[in-house]
Amino acid sequence: MTTIAPAIGQSLDRVDGRAKVTGSARYFAETPIPGISYAVLVGSRIANGRITGIDAGDARAEEGVLAVLTHENLPSIAEQPPLIPSLGGTAAPGQTFFPMQDDVVHYAGQHIAIVVADTLERAQYAASLIRVSYEERPPLVTLDQGRDQAYVPDRVFGGWLPGRVSRGDIETGLAAADVRVDTTFSYAANNHNPLEPSGTTAEWDGDEVLLHDATQGVNATQITVARQLGIPLSKIRVIGHYVGGSFGSKAMIHDHAALAALAAREVGRPVKLVLTREQMFTSVGHREEQEQRITLGATRDGRLTGIRHHKLSPTSHFDDWAEPSLGVSPEIYGCPNFDGVYRIFRANTMTPTFMRAPGEASGMFALECAMDELAGELGMDPIELRERNLSAVSPSSGRPWSSSGLLECYRRGAERFGWEGRDPRPGRRREGNWLIGTGMASAGYPVVLPPNPQRARARMYADGTAVVQAATPDFGTGVATVMTQVAADALGMSLDRCRFENGDTDLPNIAAAVGSAGSGMISAAVHSAATALRNQLIAQATGDSNSPLYGADPVDVVVQDGVMTAGTARESYAELLQRDVQPDAEATGTWSPPGGDPGYGMMTFGAQFAEVAVDAELGLVRVRRLTGAFAPGRVLNPKLARSQLMGGMLWGLGQALLEANHMHPRTGRWAGASLGEYLVAVNADAPDVDVELVEVEDSVVNPLGVKGVGEIGQVGVAAAIANAVHHATGRRVRKLPIAIEDLL
Ligand code: MOS
């Protein structure tokens, strides 16, 4: 039995908060490296064709230029590993294509040259002098250009998921329905815009290389670059303590990391390579443009008889990628008949990638808007419709949920939001020029387990302070803070005597923090290491004839504030180590996630509520209130969990109303590639955001029962907002983002 101990569950401030706001927290590009040089990447202007010539003479002649590398002179990479998402502790390239190996251009922005100089300005200027000639072919980039060529792949999402997901018989299910809704949704592409752009510094010492990298997993960078360079893992160390946000752009290891290492080896000096804001649109993947069609069938009393969910999207020429939009729709409602298909077509883009709640958010937008339409058809309250279709088991496997809490999320969310008594008729509430509406949606996100063991190390010093270590970076989630809490409880110590060190491949392996799995898997490893150290110290004391605890049964020893007690006998960790003239003691811990079939369905659930005001003449949508109720298992730190969930909800607001990019059908380039043109939610867009935490116990997912808060906060927000827009105006907007022109 795990008891909830004092540090876990506290709303501890971030342990690195001061370092971050005072600027002493060091991000990868800020690491001072003597003799550093600067690399600039040059991207292809065309989206499809071949390079017929690169004239880099003027660039090479510029003062301070150390190298210009192109497909003509860049050393070949040893191999490009297969595309497997980085959660696995395997190589995780962003795509199976590596640039500058030949003269073929597959997409606009594809890296075709790298310029290294002694200053950044000289590198940038020299890059501008490179003249490239191309043999250009017309690009194929948009959904409308490629829809006729779509096919259903065997596997999608880097090979993780099948191209078709089905159960029962969809035709029978839809035929049995009294009411059907059949509707299609379209989505603009999205790009990642974390505060800190991606990039890597590389520094060689003989045949060893040290990388400082902005990454969600230092081990993922290490394994990927080692294989690309063909060097042993022991010869590559990757450091990444602080990372300035990611949203999935740093989950896969894109080619700039290996390019920085190759360039540094070529020039014989350390190299710093930081992507420009514009390159964040072309070099780290994106969420693909897509279309989703949902068909729902239900009986008069609101029971779903069939769900059909088809998705169409472009992928690159090398990988069958589609974000898993069918990740939640087969699982959230009890419905015997489901048919889901990914259709993709080859386009002149780089391989799309993870983008926060990758697929779950877009898939649930379609399903939850369709559910709202169905509720309207049935004349049923939207929450009532969802409650009627709640499932006590995972509908796809028939296994019980490891934990749920969805019903409580509906109830408590509705109560906080003030849903009761809502007039369901659209267009009835008006305040001056503003039409007011409310909407809701369900949220679900799978509990993702890493397929490999996760490790951590704990060390107790003779002064009674402890350090716990694991390789994971902290990309803004607060992991360093919550792991300090987990370690303090497991060791039986006060928080101020424990420190968490992270972000270095010299520390024990942790898989990339992807799929909201970070807090669950890292807390499991940290808990295991700290518990092992505590047991080791207790065993040392009870076996030491000089200790007051000598002869006590280890199971009777309790530890509080660093003091071991058995009956009236007491000795602190510090006293024990000092007496034994031991500067420190150390233990490692490993958590092996349940392999194979865990025998349970594992999902995190929530419910989203939105109130919008729509200007009746201008079509302007303002979100007035958001309420989200979530059941993420054990909450390690309510303040940080709320912050994560609130951030996810605002990200959902951006998805609903702001974030969009389009590829130009003739040039194959992004229409907008800067923060001036790509809109993200800012403070002025942010309404009151109310987050309710519904704690549920879960003894299956990991030792502390942590299901994660990284992505569930976003799922369903856009649907709740779209449903509220319909309630306000009577207009169904079946696209993302919802723009002013859609409401005129
Ligand atoms: Mo997260 S989008 O699963 O890196």
Image (tube, grey):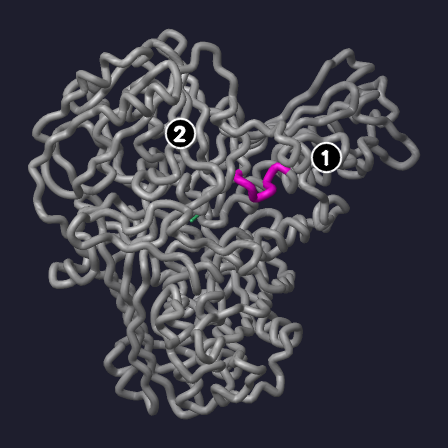
Residue shown at the point (57%, 30%) measured from the top left: 502
Task: Pick the residue in front: 341 or 284.
Answer: 284
Question: Residue 295 at what x, y percent from top left?
Answer: 30, 77
Mark 2 or 1, closer to the camera: 2
> Is residue 412 highlighted in magenta?
no
Q: CA distance from mark 2 to mark 1?
A: 40 Å
Side (left or right) of 336 relative to 475: left
Q: Is 310 placed above or below 497 here?
A: below
* Left or right: 584 as drawn, with respect to 570: left
Task: From the top left corner, tell me how far across and down residue 242 is, in percent.
Answer: 54, 33
Residue 638 lies, with reference to residue 73, above or below; the image says below
One can see residue 600 in this view = no
- Of the numbered discs 2 and 1, the one sitting upstream in the chain is 2
Check whether the beta carbons of the residues at disc 2 and disc 1 lie within 8 A of each other. no
Q: Nearer the viewer, residue 327 or 202?
A: 202
Q: Which label belongs to residue 274?
A: 2
Q: Please state the extent of the stretch shown in magenta in the rendering.
A: 475-480
**Front position in the image: 257 or 80:** 257
Disc 1 on helix, strand or loop?
A: helix
Q: Residues within 10 Å of mark 2 (few under 14, many from 20)?
A: many
- Mark 1 highlights which residue? 491
- Amino acid bearing label 1: Leu
Residue placed at 35% from the left, 28% from the top? 257
**Residue located farthest toward the top when viewing the structure as drawn:** 206
Q: Quadrant of residue 688?
A: bottom right
Q: Position of residue 229 (x, y in %)?
A: 29, 21
